[in-house]
Image (cartoon, rainbow, N blue to C red):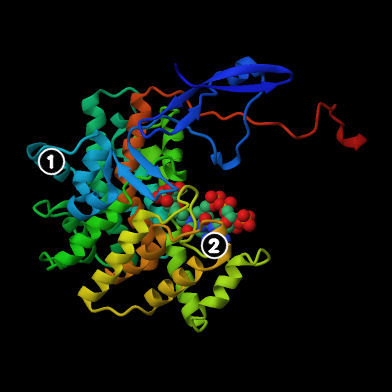
Amino acid sequence: MSEKASISINGKSHELPVITGTENEQAIDISKLRDVTGAVTLDPGFKNTGATQSAITFLDGEKGVLHYRGYPIEQLAEQSTFLEVAYLLIYGDLPAPDTLTDFRAKISRHTLIHEDMKKFFDGFPSKSHPMGQLSCLVGALSAFYPESLDPNPSEEEENLTIMKLLAKMPTIVSWIYKKSLGHPVIYPRNELNYVHNFMNMTFGQITEDTKIDPAVVRAMHKLLILHADHEQNCSASTVRIVGSSNANLYASISAGISALWGPLHGGANQAVIEMLENIRKDGGNSAKWIAKAKDKKDPFRLMGFGHRVYKNFDPRAKIIKQACDDVLEKLGIDDPVLDIAKELEEAALKDQYFVDRKLYPNVDFYSGIIYRALGFPTDMFTVLFALGRLPGWIAQWKEMKANKEPIGRPRQIYTGSTRRDYIPLDKR
Ligand code: SDX
């Protein structure tokens, strides 16, 4: 017998169906609530509201568990590659060897961007933020591929658009970086694998393939895998709701990039490094900054700490922290902000304020330290988050379309003026 929930309002009781997922999570299905009660729910920030039923990513915030299509993030980060994880998220299963080879080959055919796209790059002020450029450039892809605007594409057409976006994103990201330096761009070299090709376009020389340290390429795979999806976070929800209006994939992903930019979301990885640098310049007194983070009168927050869902360690933060140590040791880098980060973590995890609120380091706390060690400037960190998150956003968009979900349009409770008559200007 399926579980029911009872609600009584205005002296009447109603039963609502309860949905149970494959990991035994439960939801009260309120899709008919307004029809039967006349009332809607209110949940600012959707802290208690499920927007969809999804088979892509499972996370248990209390236990610090994260699975992509059932596979533990720890195993994928250690054993998989970014393009294999992209396939898994988008198509639902680990690809057979020949399927993965075919997937790689298809993507390598689309790594170039239209030469006219360069005019967009030339139009940006030299110090404009890379996230603003990325959102604009990804949205602009729809101008070069008008067929992608078809709201009802065939499976083949939808997959072609997905391939194009996956293939072109590394090129766009690396060219944003090169343009910021005033360097000539480096064109993709399709004999290199996806991540190596990206690293070569970013850090390579014009003439030959720079010998990118394999440890650096492996670390980049791990970072991109760890960022690849995270169920209904702010930017994924943005991609789904924009796509629900039948907007094309490029426009939906462009909106997701803008949502990720915020320092409360993906922009936190840039904010963490800026915070750690400020603390270092201020003398490295972690106790002082922990006190500021707890002071409600002080706007300072410990960036990279806390999470809407994780009330335990973010499993990604644990992996990235270890990778931090490994990469900095391998590259012989001694970054003073890593010691400050570890001191802050140690102090916060023993402090009642953080313990009571279950605030732990999240994915953004250590990631910037690795990105910096790999040679990326701070304002590129969130762009790298977007590069990793792209397959997750695509998977979420594809699932929303396949489920034929209705256009997203939340309700509200009106609290403004009740009806009143217009007062002509000369009478006010
Ligand atoms: C990402 O959702 C996802 O999955 C996102 C993400 C993904 O992969 O897509 O995981 C990526 O966005 C990670 C989060 C990156 N953001 C930051 O690191 C910014 C710093 N963190 C906070 O701003 C905050 O923790 C949020 C935004 C992440 C979560 O905010 P919530 O869930 O709305 O919680 P809240 O702001 O209501 O905080 C609850 C309490 C409050 O104190 P009280 O009012 O109860 O006294 O905890 C306090 C907050 O003031 N608090 C913090 C804090 N985070 C929360 N206090 C100090 N420092 C912090 N970082």
- Nearer the observer, 426 or 160: 160
**Looking at the picture, how far across and down is residue 223, in whole percent?**
28, 57
Residue behind mark 2: 354
Number of numbered callouts drawn: 2
**Looking at the picture, how far across and down is residue 224, in whole percent?**
28, 54
Q: Amino acid at mark 2?
A: Phe
Q: Is residue 268 left or right of residue 104?
A: right
Identity of the residue drawn at 45% across and 18% down: 2
Element type where label 1 sits in the image: helix
Q: Residue furthest bottom?
A: 283
Looking at the picture, does residue 216 appear above or below residue 24?
A: below
Q: Label 1 neighbourhood size at 10 Å, few (<14), some (14-19), many (20+)?
A: some
Q: Is residue 387 left or right of residue 18?
A: left
Q: Is mark 2 within 8 Å of ligand 1?
A: yes
Tag on residue 167? none
Which of the two discs, 2 and 1, sits closer to the camera? Answer: 2
**Of callouts 2 and 1, the N-terminal one:** 1
- Nearer the observer, 53 or 250: 53
Residue 130 visible here: yes
- Nearer the observer, 91 or 325: 325
Residue behind mark 1: 100
Identity of the residue drawn at 43% across and 54% down: 266
Q: Label 2 neighbourhood size at 10 Å, few (<14), some (14-19), many (20+)?
A: some
